[in-house]
């Protein structure tokens, strides 16, 4: 859930059909118009125009007062002046509908989503000292673009995703096939991080303490035992940095605290709600028609993680835990849980179709199980944040 996303389904026997992106309709003047308004709908205010004199491409600045209800930001990056508009405790939504409840205590929050949204992530950074809120995130668009990923280099600099050698001169069709071919996961060093890792005390290894939320009602194709084991296995894969590249392990320890009936801080509308001090992950029944596979919500303060909650879609997706028994319309619950846990640990999505063998690629097909082992880039991202043992 760090975060354009596409979950590709098999539909009518065809693979690679993108789930439709949920887009927000905007009325003239920048005020968001709700589709099919219902009685007593919350008031909404939309911001779209750049501040007078602002350079093209710079962050816009809110010049309208906040209103009770939902605040819609129609472009990112965006800066809200808290002396004119204090959005704390208000549901803030980005250009494609991905939303977060702005924490009232001044914490910052990030939503990372897999499937069914036009944005990969939405970050709301609250700065009480400067009295401003900065809204950022990945703009709407699919993950199948050819743009290179900008990476955090382990040496502290910036680098671009390594690409395989160019194809030898031959027919145009041969060159096209080579350009579209994915990089081997053990050769692909691409990764991105959001810079907010788990906190650690002194030289001790960081510890991920988490609770499991079983949810209520059925989950397509999975029984209660399989649902729980999917999170246990997916979390273990991520914290160990499990891989087939002979890269060793990552220096993270996890503590499973058991089951809880307190749900993750996620709203049924598919937005991040309020933090409660617990790292909870489990199954949520989202509103009808919600096609996301998973959502990760992270709260952080002064660059350190405060809480991370994960929700997999129990009502709008079908799941599998075994490749042999995978049905044509099901997704690997273990792999998706591992992907969302990597978001919790501080990794963000990598862009570009050539990186689709990495666990942090923002799309997965039905009955694909390669997310259960991390690629080189996934491991390097964890190594930079936590070290290796």
Image (cartoon, grey):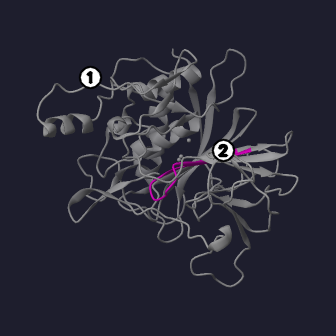
Image point (56%, 25%), residue name: 252
Specify which label sits upstream in the sequence, 2 or 1. Answer: 2
When asked about the image quadrant of residue 128, the answer is top right
The location of residue 146, given as percent across then percent down, is: 36, 41
Q: Nearer the viewer, residue 98 or 340?
A: 98
Q: Which residue is mark 1?
A: 165
Q: Is residue 192 visible?
A: yes
Distance between the alpha carbons at the discs numbered 2 and 1:
36 Å
Specify the farthest residue to the front.
Answer: 53
Categorize mark 2 by other alpha carbons within 10 Å: few (<14), some (14-19), many (20+).
few
Image point (61%, 55%), residue name: 75
Q: Secondary structure at mark 1?
A: loop
Residues shaded magenta:
109-125
Q: Secondary structure at mark 2?
A: loop
Specify the farthest residue to the bottom.
Answer: 39
Is 100 positioned to the left or the right of 360 in the image?
right
Image point (56%, 19%), residue name: 157
Image point (77%, 44%), residue name: 126
Label 2 vs label 1, nearer the camera: 2
The location of residue 254, given as percent across then percent down, is: 57, 31
The location of residue 106, given as percent across then percent down, is: 81, 45
The location of residue 44, given as percent across then percent down, is: 71, 70
In the rendering, which numbered label is found on residue 75?
none
Q: Which residue is mark 2?
A: 58
Does residue 124 belong to the magenta stretch? yes
Is 172 positioned to the left or the right of 164 in the image?
left
- In the depicted structure, whether residue 303 falls above or below residue 95: above
Categorize mark 1 by other alpha carbons within 10 Å: few (<14), some (14-19), many (20+).
few
């Amino acid at each position: 859930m760090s975060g354009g996303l596409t979950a590709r389904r098999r539909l009518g026997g065809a693979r690679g059909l993108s789930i439709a992106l949920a887009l927000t309709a905007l009325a003239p003047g920048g005020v968001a118009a709700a589709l099919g308004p219902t009685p007593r709908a919350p008031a909404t205010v939309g911001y779209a125009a750049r501040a007078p004199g602002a350079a093209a491409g710079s962050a816009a600045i809110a010049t309208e007062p906040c209103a009770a209800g939902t605040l819609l930001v129609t472009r990112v990056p965006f800066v809200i002046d808290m002396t004119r508009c204090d959005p704390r405790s208000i549901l803030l939504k980005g250009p494609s509908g991905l939303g977060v409840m702005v924490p009232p205590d001044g914490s910052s929050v990030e939503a990372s989503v897999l499937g069914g949204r036009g944005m990969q992530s939405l970050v709301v950074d609250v700065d009480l000292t400067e009295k401003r809120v900065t809204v950022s995130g990945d703009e709407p668009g699919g993950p199948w673009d050819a743009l290179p990923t900008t990476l955090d280099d382990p040496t502290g600099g910036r680098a671009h995703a390594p690409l395989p050698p160019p194809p030898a001169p031959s027919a145009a069709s041969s060159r096209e096939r080579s350009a579209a071919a994915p990089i081997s996961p053990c050769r692909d060093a691409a990764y991105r991080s959001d810079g907010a890792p788990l906190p650690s005390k002194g030289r001790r290894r960081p510890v991920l303490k988490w609770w499991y939320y079983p949810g209520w009602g059925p989950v397509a194709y999975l029984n209660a035992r399989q649902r729980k084991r999917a999170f246990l296995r997916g979390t273990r894969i991520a914290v160990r940095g499990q891989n087939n590249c002979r890269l060793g392990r990552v220096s993270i320890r996890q503590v499973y605290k058991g089951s809880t009936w307190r749900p993750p801080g996620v709203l049924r509308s598919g937005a991040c709600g309020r933090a409660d001090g617990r790292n909870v992950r489990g199954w949520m029944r989202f509103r009808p028609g919600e096609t996301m596979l998973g959502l990760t919500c992270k709260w952080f303060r002064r660059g350190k993680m405060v809480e991370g909650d994960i929700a997999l879609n129990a009502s709008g997706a079908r799941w599998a835990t075994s490749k042999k028994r995978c049905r044509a319309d099901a997704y690997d619950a273990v792999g998706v849980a591992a992907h969302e846990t990597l978001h919790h640990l501080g990794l963000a999505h990598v862009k570009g179709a050539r990186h689709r063998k990495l666990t942090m690629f923002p799309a997965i097909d039905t009955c694909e199980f390669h997310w259960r082992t991390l690629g080189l880039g996934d491991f390097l991202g964890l190594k930079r944040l936590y070290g290796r043992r």
